[in-house]
Amino acid sequence: MMYVKHFLYDYLIEIGISITYAKYLNMIALLLCLLIITLLVDYIVKKIILNLFTQFTFKTKTEFDNFLVTNKVPKNVAHIIPLILSLELIPVVFADFPYFENLVEKGFLVFAIILALWIARSLLNALKDYFKTLSSLKDKPVDSYIQVFMIFAWVIGTFSAVAIITGIEFIKFMTTLGAASAIIILVFRDTILGFVASIQVSINDMVRISDWITFEKYGADGAVVEINLSTVKVQNFDKTITTIPTYALISDSFKNWRGMEKSSGRRIKRALNIKLDSIAYLSKDDVNRLKKIDLISSYVEKRQIDIDSYNEINKINKELALNGRNMTNIGVFRKYIETYIENHSGINKDMMIMVRQLAPTRHGMPLEIYAFSSDKRWENYEYIMADIFDHTIAAVPYFNLELFEEPSNSSFNNFRSLS
């Protein structure tokens, strides 16, 4: 080994080179040899490992080894042997320069930490890609967990590198760093909040990948495509991407449509505003006219028989329509809508169907339709709902009812023409 350390030094001294120059030239020559040997070994080892791993992947059925190759895990692992060889040969190269030996050795140790982080990152990325192929984990925030492990790895790696450069023992360095924990918490505030939020989101099963969420504060309305440590990405229906802080899922309110997607139907909840002064009792002529409507003819006839029987038994004075029992146009219209919806092909008959009156407002009497479409796809759902309201709005005049509508310019123009 002594001969290797000074293989060029002795020759340079013999030909008359000064001792100082001979030492430097000897070190440079050994350094060049070290670089050549390291690069050559690295190339050979990398080829061997890649070939062996490729053959191994062909023989196995699992896809995990394919993800290891894709994320360059074998390639990064191949650098370990040349690195170890370099660390062993450094004392030989810098035998006459202990100061340089210390610096270079620290540099290689820092590189070893960086290499370990590369390997950890590529391995974690391979695990992430593999987990996303598993049906049980497709909707879980795998990215968040991987990022958490990677952050811990980078923090430990950075602290280790600083400890090596400064020459302070790792434990002492961490103890000293504990005093600055308040500053660290302040710097990594968003990361810590995101980490806590991602755990709560996962444990409480609040959001999954591919869930449709509506977050009005951030203008998000679409499918969740990614959940990581700091952000949640939502692809809106216009194909734009909205980025939401992960901790906002905990601190703010949002709507998750997963329950609707898992149910047997999608809710229709919309009202028609009926003008109050158009609501009235039905006359005999009105009753006879409404009997011609197929959907409610039997209902109107039976209902009128029951009312007439009650009024006759109780000797009700029917000179005033107010006395006794009567049918109203809005009541019959409500029954008509309910019957129409019950017979509509796009409505789920196994879920609630209801037509109800809401409290009167300055816009009239709201008549709300509450039902569930059997088709939950957005475009089909909108078509079913529009088809129902197209029909019901057009049916309103047949019951001598009117819909409330804010006055428009044409309304005032018509009023002027009449006056």
Image (spheres, rainbow, N blue to C red):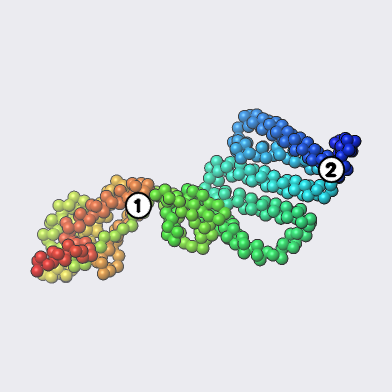
**Picture coordinates of residue 124, whole percent (x, y):** 63, 45
For mark 2, give the secondary structure: helix
**Picture coordinates of residue 342, whole percent (x, y):** 29, 51
- Please identify the quadrant where the C terminus is shown: bottom left
> Which amino acid type is marked by label 2?
Tyr
The residue to which callout 2 is attached is: 21
Disc 2 crowd, CA 10 A, few/some/many (<14, 14-19, 20+): few
371 lies left or right of 79:
left
For mark 1, give the secondary structure: strand
Of discs 1 and 2, which sits in the foreground?
A: 2
Name which residue lies at 20% across and 54% down: 394
N-terminal label among 1 and 2: 2
Name which residue lies at 12% across and 56% down: 288
Give the distance between the C-alpha atoms of the residues marked 1 and 2, in whole angstroms.
91 Å
Residue 325 in view of the camera: no
Marker count (numbered)? 2
Disc 1 crowd, CA 10 A, few/some/many (<14, 14-19, 20+): many
**Picture coordinates of residue 50, whole percent (x, y):** 66, 32
- For the residue pair 348 and 78, the one nearer the viewer reads as 78
Residue 158 in view of the camera: yes
Label disc, if present, on residue 372 of the rendered structure? 1
State whether residue 319 is above or below residue 294: below
164 lies left or right of 352:
right
- For the residue pair 270 and 148, the one nearer the viewer reads as 148
Name which residue lies at 81% across and 43% down: 90
- For the residue pair 33 and 313, the one nearer the viewer reads as 33
> Which amino acid type is marked by label 1?
Phe
- For the residue pair 158 and 265, the one nearer the viewer reads as 158
State whether residue 70 is above or below residue 167: above
